[in-house]
Each structure stands twice: as C-alpha cells, then as structure tokens.
C-alpha cells in the first residue's frame, strides 16, 4: 500500500505541475506559438514560408491531437509544455502535407509564386526572386519532407534556357536604367532544391551564374541579344569559372577570371510583379 500511495502522490504532483498557473517568465500563448512554428517555413516545402499550408483549420488539426492526448484538449500555458506540443504537431503537419490533395495545394502555391516573382530595386541593381520552379511534388516518408520529382522548367538540374531568356528579356526591357539584373531561382535537382543566381552585368556585358560560393562567367558580349543568341552557351557547366572578388577584371581578359560578389536584396522587397505569362 505504501508504494501505491507514493505513486499516487508522484502522479498528483506531476499533474499539478502541468495544470497550475506558471510564473509569468514561463507563460506563453501556446496556440500562437504553435501556429507560427508550423507556418514559419521550417516544416514546409523547400523550407520556405511561401509554400506553407496556412489554412487555420489545417494547422489547428495538426496541433489538436497532442492536446487531446495529454492535456484534456486544452493548450498548456507553460512554455516547455507548449514547445513539446509543437514538436508533436510538426510531425502531424508534415504527414498531412504528404496527402495527394494537399500536395496539389502546395504545387499551386509554388506555381503562383513563380508566376508572380518578387521584385526589389536598388540604385543600380534590380533583383527578381522567382521562388522555386513549379513542378510535381511527392512526399518522402523517410524524412517527412516534400521533394520535386518533375518540372518542365528544369533540365538536368539547370533552369530551362527558354525560361531564363524570357525573364531576362522581360525585366531588361522594363528596367533599362539598372546596371545589374539579378535573378534568383530554386531549381529541382536529384539532391533537392538548389538556388541559382543569374546576374546580367550590363556595364561589363556578361552573364555571371552563381551557385553557393562558386561562380562562372560568360564571355563579354555586344549586348543581351548577343548573349541569348542560339549557340551561345549559358549552362553553368559550360561557363568559365571565376574567382569572386571586388577586384575588376582586366578589360582584355575574356572571359574574365574574376566576378563581383553577389549582393542579395534587402529583406523589404517590393510587392510581387504582375504575372509574366
């Protein structure tokens, strides 16, 4: 009997710790914390907030089961308990994304984001963020993540040339005063989504393509029309490697062996551009 009383006392103490009002320093709005955590991007396709399914009913349906299981359906007020709810809800949220009807919703978010790129302007630089190329998604049960298995806008891990040409011509015509046209795009590869940055350097009349910390350059051309002429190599593997530095390339060096560092746009981007289609 003594052991049973000790166990009952332990359980009662543990339950009291969960239900009593926590001190202000440990108190949190658990629902707000969980909803923000699930839709911040960490648990979404390509780890981007743009591709999160944020319908309140969908998000809350991922949170509620853990509350029903451990907390009588109510959200705990103590931060440590709310964070435990978030960890359980994240798994439920990711599994729900993998259902075919929800994959279709994410695919539509990717397509809409691509067709309405975000544009930001600086004194000399125009930055165009295309997001990820649209395509067909499937769930990866081992990681509970989403992967793109097919895209009409990617060929062998490269952005499709016709799409690159379309976007370059469109924004070059709209912003003839900008010296640098910067385009970033997420491209589907066998290893996941790879961000590629294309920069048309109008003053130097060349294209620089950067993946991570490595960059490659085209030859100097007479202009954009010459760069995009049939037969001119634009694939990353066919361009010449260049060292990223602020030093300028000698005018007679072609293709240049140095490339200027990339300067990503500020976080406060302008509203999305109208559809390019």
Image: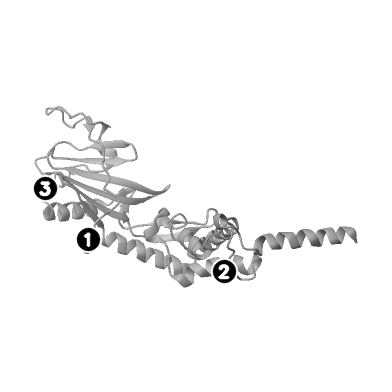
Element under label 2? helix
**Quadrant of the drawing holding the C terminus:** bottom left
**Any part of residue 148 in sight:** no
Q: Which dot, 3 or 1, sits closer to the camera?
A: 1
Element under label 3? helix
Q: Position of residue 276 (x, y in %)?
A: 21, 62
212 sits to left or right of 90: left
**Any part of residue 51 in sight:** yes
Taking the view exactly as shown, the residue that stands out farthest to the right is: 1
State the residue in front, 68 or 187: 68
On the image, numbered disc 3 is attached to which residue? Answer: 225
Q: Position of residue 6 (x, y in %)?
A: 83, 58
Write down the quadrant of residue 91 in the picture: bottom right
N-terminal label among 3 and 2: 2
Separation of disc 3 and disc 1 at Cα?
23 Å
Q: Which dot, 3 or 2, sits closer to the camera?
A: 2
Separation of disc 1 and disc 2 at Cα?
38 Å
Q: Who's the residue at 58% across and 60% down the image?
A: 85
On the image, numbered disc 2 is attached to which residue? Answer: 64
Q: How is the image coloured?
A: one colour
N-terminal label among 1 and 2: 2
275 sits to left or right of 194: left
State the residue in front, 138 or 183: 183
On the image, numbered disc 1 is attached to which residue? Answer: 273
Disc 1 and disc 2 in contact, CB within 8 angstroms = no
Q: Who's the residue at 26% across and 58% down the image?
A: 117
Separation of disc 3 and disc 2 at Cα?
57 Å
5 sits to left or right of 160: right
State the residue in front, 21 or 11: 21
């Amino acid at each position: 009997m003594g052991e049973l009383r000790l166990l009952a006392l332990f359980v009662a103490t543990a339950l009291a710790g969960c239900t009593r009002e926590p001190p202000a320093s440990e108190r949190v709005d658990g629902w707000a914390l969980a909803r923000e955590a699930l839709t911040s991007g960490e648990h979404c396709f390509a780890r981007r907030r743009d591709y999160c399914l944020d319908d309140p009913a969908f998000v809350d349906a991922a949170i509620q089961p853990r509350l029903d299981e451990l907390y009588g359906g109510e959200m705990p007020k103590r931060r440590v308990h709310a964070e435990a709810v978030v960890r359980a809800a994240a798994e439920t949220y990711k599994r729900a994304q993998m259902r075919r009807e929800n994959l279709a919703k994410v695919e539509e978010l990717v397509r809409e984001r691509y067709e309405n790129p975000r544009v930001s302007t600086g004194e000399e630089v125009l930055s165009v963020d295309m997001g990820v190329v649209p395509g067909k998604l499937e769930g990866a049960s081992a990681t509970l993540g989403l992967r793109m298995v097919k895209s009409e806008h990617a060929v062998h891990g490269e952005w499709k040339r016709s799409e690159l040409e379309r976007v370059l011509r469109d924004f070059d015509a709209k912003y003839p005063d900008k010296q640098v046209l910067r385009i970033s795009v997420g491209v589907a590869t066998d290893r996941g989504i790879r961000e590629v940055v294309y920069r048309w350097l109008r003053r130097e009349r060349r294209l620089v393509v950067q993946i991570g910390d490595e960059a490659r350059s085209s030859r100097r051309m007479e202009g954009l029309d010459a760069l995009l002429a049939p037969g001119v190599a634009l694939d990353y593997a066919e361009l010449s490697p260049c060292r990223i530095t602020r030093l300028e390339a000698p005018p007679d060096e072609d293709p240049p062996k140095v490339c200027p560092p990339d300067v990503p746009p500020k976080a406060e981007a302008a509203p999305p551009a109208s559809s390019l289609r």
